[in-house]
Amino acid sequence: MTSTAANDGSRAQAQIGVTGLAVMGSNLARNLARHGHTVAVHNRSKAKTDVLIADHGSEGNFIPSESIADFVASLELPRRVLIMVKAGDPTDAVINELADAMEPGDIIIDGGNARFTDTIRREAAMRERGLHFVGAGVSGGEVGALEGPSIMPGGSVESYKSLGPLLESISAHVDGIPCCAHIGTDGSGHFVKMVHNGIEYSDMQLIGEAYDLMRRVLGYSAAEIAAVFREWNAGELESYLVEITAEVLDKIDPQTGKALVDVIVDAAEQKGTGRWTVQSALDLGVPVTGIAEAVFARALSGSRAQRAATRGLTGGDLPSADEALAGRDADAFVEDIRLALFGSKVIAYAQGFDQITAGSVEHNWGVKPVDLATIWRGGCIIRARFLNRIRDAYTENPELLSLILDPYFRDAVGGALGSWRRVVTTAVTLGIPTPGFSSSLAYYDGLRADRLPAALTQGQRDYFGAHTYERIDAPVGKKFHILWSEGGAEVEA
Ligand code: NBP
């Protein structure tokens, strides 16, 4: 261990500095040190720095500092500082303090969960001062931070040349390929991390619906459902979230001896990245229906007063589960649920990739979907076997208009439809909410439809607001209007 205070500013030997040494920052600092990098470490209050050095100082070369001035002085040029503090105002405060102490050409990296619009603003402000600002999405939670996260850095190409090798060295690796790649300029890294989290919301909601159906339709115990998820994890659904679902469902509450899931309050919380994803999708006009349903499902679950007041309202004349299953046995229904989950999950990723493409076009980022499919294969929360398939799909056709047009996914979704429709029908018949499964199926049916009722919507809009419409037999873009209250003739608008 080297834990030398670099107070005279003459020992500029650290390859990178980390400020903000709560769980994420200290684990990333340890990860960097374990990979042979000399790491300058700093925290607003000294206690966290002391704990890191006392508990883990032997894992590599750390240079602790108490002041920002000493911290910055302990870094080699160009200086690279990773900020891992609470997102929002604390991040701005730290950026400004660092910028005052740093010099043109130095690199400030924000690895927190910043909103991408804040990152765009911060990057512009730092560029004015000659500094590089890199908004880096980091996924994988605290374990990932220590053992290998998925890292999504934005910022200038020049900054990535200096920073990329360091970040790639500590990221997860799949088949020898790092789960870290330059995403694009300014806010692109935090944008794709945001959408990653949106997909994560959707995936978790779908898994929850699968669980709920096994519980309520088939009467399976938590342990029996854990076994099903474990089996699914050996196939095409293999993923981190399916894996941990089995672990959570198997967990026994030490206090009561019941399944832990049965003593946890059923009100899901959220920190905001799912909501941001949907807000951004609304701005971009991209239908991320699966993600939106997942965010709203959490909101509904958390409406505790309203739920207490409405619990027990009639569901109408409901059949029994046996009647709804209409002779299908439990194994057949479990297989239906597996396929409904797979089909819906494909839609979640398809919608997320659509949003990334739209955001990239809007902001001129040049994000390559294949890079995301590559770096999300390991380290992050949505890592899943089928990201290899998504990677293949975008390698084959970088301009893919929708993931469901790729032959593998087209066939996989097509093959799941019978089961998927049975699952949604059964759920509706029994009054069991499956907003993720249902909305994903409606999205698919909407996309594949020959005609949509949007024609009627356009007619209505023209009626009440003279908003005009296009005709199927006229050139694209040519607008028409009916003189509704003046005789009903059609005119060119
Ligand atoms: P927290 O989000 O809990 O932040 C605590 C850190 O922020 C401490 O080091 C604290 O210093 C520092 N801090 C605060 Br609060 N206000 C400050 C200020 N005004 N000036 C300087 N420092 C300030 O830490 P975390 O859970 O390790 O997460 C760090 C970042 O990583 C967050 O943006 C988070 O959203 C993101 N993230 C977290 C995860 C995860 O799984 N937890 C995953 C991916 C990304 P102090 O010790 O002096 O109070």
Image (cartoon, grey):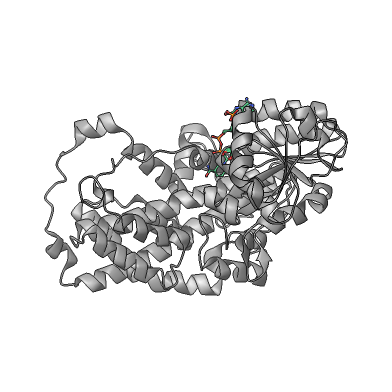
In which quadrant will I find the C terminus? top right
Residue at the image position 14 percent from the left and 46 percent from the top: 316
Front one among 353 and 451 = 353
Left or right: 191 as drawn, with respect to 133: left
363 over 7 or under it: above or below: below
Residue 408: x %, y % from top left? 52, 74
Residue at the image position 53 percent from the left and 35 percent from the top: 466
Rendered image quadrant of residue 469: top right
Front one among 30 and 348 = 30
Rendered image quadrant of residue 327: bottom left
- Quadrant holding ligand 1? top right
209 over 118 or under it: above or below: below
- Total marks drawn? 0
Residue 269: x %, y % from top left? 40, 38
Rendered image quadrant of residue 234: bottom left
Residue 184: x %, y % from top left? 73, 50
Front one among 390 and 38 = 38
Q: Is residue 493 visible?
A: no
Q: Is residue 84 visible?
A: yes
Front one among 29 and 302 = 29
Left or right: 19 as drawn, with respect to 488: right
Left or right: 181 as drawn, with respect to 243: right
Residue 263: x %, y % from top left? 25, 44
